[in-house]
Image (cartoon, helix red, strand yellow):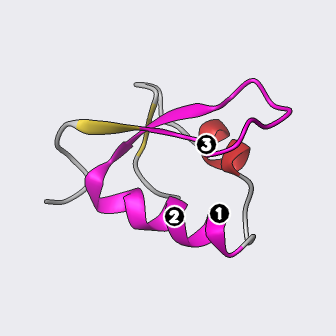
Amino acid sequence: MGRTGPPTLTRAARRQRSTGRCVRVVAAELWSIENNVSGANMDFEEFVRAVDDDGVYRGL
C-alpha cells in the first residue's frame, strides 16, 4: 500500500484548543502521526493543516 488507497479517519486523543481534532490519513502515513505526536515532535493540528486538496494527509 502506497500513498493511495482509502483513508482512515484519525482523531486527537485529547481535546485540544484547536478546532482541527480529526484528519483523514492514508494507512501508509498513519505511523508518522503516531510517532510525531506521541514524541511531542509535532502537534496534531500540524497534520490537520497538512492535508491535500482532497482533505487527506498523505505525508509531508
Task: Say which element carries label 2.
Answer: helix
Residue drawn at the location 47% of the way across and 26% of the way down: 53
Question: Disc 3 designates what residue?
Answer: 12
Task: Say which element carries label 1.
Answer: helix
Kindly identify the amino acid type of the residue bearing the numbered disc 1.
Answer: Val
Residue drawn at the location 67% of the way across and 49% of the way down: 44
Question: Disc 2 designates what residue?
Answer: 34
Figure check: 18 above or below 35: above
Q: Earlier along the polypeptide chain: callout 1 or callout 3?
A: 3
Choose between 13 and 23: the one closer to the eye. 13
Q: Do the residues labelled 2 and 1 touch (CB within 8 Å)?
A: yes
Residue 31 lies in what quarter of the image? bottom left
Choose between 15 and 8: the one closer to the eye. 15
In this rendering, position of residue 42 left or right of residue 28: right
Question: Disc 1 designates what residue?
Answer: 37
Q: What stretch is highlighted in magenta?
A: 10-39
| Residue 55 in picture, x, y percent from top left | 46, 27
